[in-house]
Amino acid sequence: MTQLSRRSLNCPKCNSSFSIIYNASINTWMDPTLAKDFLEGKGYTFICPSCNQNIRLVTTIIINTLKGMFNISTDSSKEERKTLYAHYGLLTDTGEFGNPQEEWLLHQFAEMNAPEDTKTQIRRQDKILEEIHKKLILYKTKLREKSPLNEKEKEEYIILQNRWEEEHNRENDYLHHPKTAESRTSTSILFQKLWKDLVKIKTELDELK
């Protein structure tokens, strides 16, 4: 999945430091826009709030594709990025970013008939994600209203995060296994949408706590 990280940057012009949030990893099939922006060298330049100096964050990030993951520096050249993108199937025949993997995956969801036990498993996962989603929204509302979580709610929140991670890992196993990937149906698209929303909610929760 796409993961956010927080760190401090020091301004070389005025010597002040400030906090930033950046994408420490990018999931190419859930966030193709972020993957395309990184290919073009966007997304890792920040402006110092004290003097408006542009500062480029130089760090190593993870690109997560359907064919595997790879590490790459934000300071890499466009040619280096294109070489790796091509190797992991993220470029079209003309060398442009087109995420053909995502198109293939959605085609499989729409066209293949999954065995009934696979459909049942997918529906079970979607239901779990919906339950977690509703609970996290309630927690977010409380925190925004400056109402602290009680001890029981804090424990539930940790349990929910663990369940969330377990379901995501299970889903990843399905997507990376050739036999099950070929038998997936469109019901799993709901999982991807819920997961993307949960990432945003969790980020907001972590900032509000």
Image (cartoon, rainbow, N blue to C red):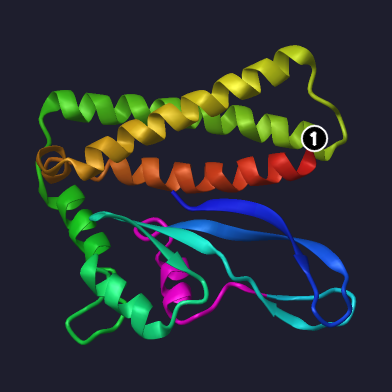
Residue 87 position by quadrant: bottom left
In the rendering, at what x and y percent does residue 52 appear?
Answer: 83, 82
At x 30%, y 71%, the residue is: 84
Regarding residue 174, the answer to whether it shows in the image is yes
Q: Nearer the viewer, residue 42 or 188?
A: 42
In the rendering, at what x and y percent does residue 158 appear?
Answer: 62, 23
Magenta span includes 40: yes
Disc 1 residue crowd, few under 14, some 14–19, many 20+, Cα 10 Å:
some
Magenta extent? 27-45
Instruction: Quickly name the residue at label 1.
Output: 143
101 displayed left or right of 168:
left
9 displayed left or right of 16:
left
In the rendering, at what x and y percent does residue 15 appear?
Answer: 87, 74
3 displayed left or right of 20:
left
Number of numbered markers = 1
At x 16%, y 23%, the residue is: 117
In the rendering, at what x and y percent does residue 126 appear?
Answer: 38, 32
Magenta span includes 113: no
At x 33%, y 46%, the residue is: 189
Regarding residue 185, the answer to whether it shows in the image is no
Hey, what amino acid is under mark 1?
Answer: Leu
